[in-house]
């Protein structure tokens, strides 16, 4: 295969940030199709008015000619009003709601302290078909950080989905074999996004010759057997698995410090990075489903009508991009020769 033409890939999980950071990173995501935009701003996107205002800021930051379509999400809190969710969904303001367990990750302080508190909201979401997007990790200090995803699925999400049998759900940034098995067993109403970095790296990347803050993300990288399971799932053709980059920019100064931030900025290299993985797995014929079809189908959309060309031509992305106002962000796979270019 020398060249693949695909419907413009979508990114079903991305952090675009706000203000100067938004303006700095938006061009990197603007070449994608649909963007499911995470709501973990400060303060978080909890109301229809917040979401409308944020969408305008995103649109103002989009480069001329970009055809990306930002799809917003609501940030669930213990005090989420189920009727606000219903109204915002009916009006097309947001397409899904995101569950951050409180303290699980960046800007999750306002997140949900116990899913029992949002049951009324989840019942409305099940009724109207609004997907629940989950950061699936427990936060209890006695649970090992590498076990937090599997524990959440077993203790929280499994019982919840058994109770709310109409609730549609995406296990965001799946990182383990446990997550792959959980999703595969539940068929079309449960999906999962998979990031490029969890397909490229196992947890050794965190300690490769020294401590590597730019490989630190949440959920944290897992074992090689988990990475293998993610590669098998992504390349299997199973429509429950689709691309969500979890591109999460933080300034280098915020990562290379005591208590550095979690997040990998991969928007510039995500499509080429996924293509390289599918090539290694002998599954380039399944890249179209993963990048351009499965996620759209989950959200009830057709694949994009416009296309991109993925060409087997070596390409090296820049190591960093500058941030407006000073500083820069490290680019995932920046400086690493990649076998594909995207046009
Ligand atoms: O690594 C991560 N970064 N994981 C998340 O869940 C949040 C994200 C961020 O917003 O920085
Ligand atoms: Zn995320």
Image (cartoon, grey):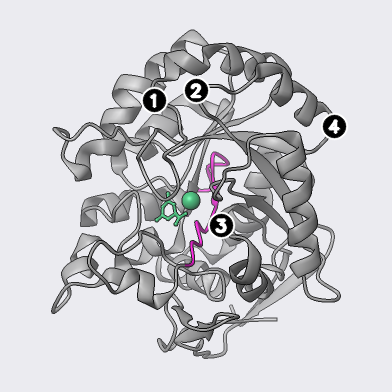
Q: Does mark 4's beta carbon lie closer than 8 Å to ligand 2?
A: no
Q: Is residue 164 magenta?
A: no
Name the residue that disc number 2 marks.
78
Residue bounds of the magenta highlight: 235-249
- SS of the residue at dot 2? loop
**Quadrant location, the C terminus:** bottom right
Whole-Å distance between the Cαs marked 4 and 1? Answer: 28 Å
Mark in front: 2 vs 4: 2
Mark in front: 4 vs 1: 1
Specify which label sits upstream in the sequence, 3 or 4: 3
Does residue 270 appear left or right of residue 93 in this picture?
A: left
Specify which label sits upstream in the sequence, 1 or 2: 2
Asked if the residue at tag 2 contacts the one at tag 1, i.e. Cβ–Cβ closer than 8 Å, the answer is yes
Q: Does mark 3's beta carbon lie closer than 8 Å to ligand 1?
A: yes
Which mark is on residue 113?
1
Q: Position of residue 292 (x, y in %)?
A: 67, 56
- SS of the residue at dot 1? loop
- SS of the residue at dot 3? loop
Q: Residue furthest top?
A: 163
Residue 102, can we see it? Answer: yes
Q: Residues within 10 Å of mark 1 (few under 14, many from 20)?
A: some
Asked if the residue at tag 3 contacts the one at tag 2, i.e. Cβ–Cβ closer than 8 Å, the answer is no
Residue depicted at 71% across the width and 37% down the height: 95
Name the residue that disc number 4 marks.
91
Mark in front: 3 vs 1: 1
Residue 214, can we see it? Answer: no
Judging depth in this view, the residue of 244 and 36 nearest the camera is 36
Judging depth in this view, the residue of 128 and 337 nearest the camera is 128
């Amino acid at each position: 295969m020398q060249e693949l033409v695909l419907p413009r890939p979508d990114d079903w999980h991305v952090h675009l940030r706000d203000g100067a950071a938004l303006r700095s990173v938006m061009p990197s995501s603007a070449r994608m199709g649909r963007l499911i935009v995470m709501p973990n701003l400060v303060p978080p996107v909890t109301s229809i008015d917040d979401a409308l205002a944020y969408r305008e800021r995103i649109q103002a930051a989009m480069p001329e000619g970009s055809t990306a379509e930002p799809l917003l999400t609501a940030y669930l809190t213990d005090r989420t009003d189920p009727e606000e969710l219903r109204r915002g969904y009916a009006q097309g303001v947001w397409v899904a709601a995101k569950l951050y367990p409180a303290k699980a990750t960046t800007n999750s302080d306002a997140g949900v302290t116990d899913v029992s508190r949002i049951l009324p909201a989840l019942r409305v979401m099940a009724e109207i078909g609004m997907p629940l997007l989950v950061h699936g990790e427990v936060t209890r200090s006695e649970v090992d950080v590498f076990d937090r995803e599997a524990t959440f699925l077993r203790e929280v999400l499994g019982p919840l989905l058994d109770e709310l049998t109409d609730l549609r759900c995406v296990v965001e940034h799946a990182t383990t074999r446990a997550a792959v098995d959980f999703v595969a067993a539940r068929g079309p109403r449960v999906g999962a996004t998979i990031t490029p970095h969890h397909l490229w790296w196992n947890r050794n990347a965190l300690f490769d010759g020294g401590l590597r803050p730019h490989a630190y993300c949440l959920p944290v990288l897992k074992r090689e057997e988990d990475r293998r399971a993610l590669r098998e799932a992504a390349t299997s053709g199973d429509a429950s698995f689709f691309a969500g980059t979890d591109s999460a920019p933080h300034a280098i100064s915020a990562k290379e410090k005591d208590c550095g931030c979690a997040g990998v900025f991969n928007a510039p290299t995500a499509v080429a990075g996924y293509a390289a993985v599918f090539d290694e797995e002998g599954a380039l014929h399944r890249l179209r489903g993963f990048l351009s079809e499965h996620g759209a189908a989950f959200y009830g959309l057709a694949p994009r009508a416009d296309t991109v060309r993925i060409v087997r031509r070596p390409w090296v992305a820049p190591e960093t991009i500058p941030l407006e106002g000073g500083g820069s962000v490290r680019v995932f796979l920046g400086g690493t020769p990649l076998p594909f270019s995207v046009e």
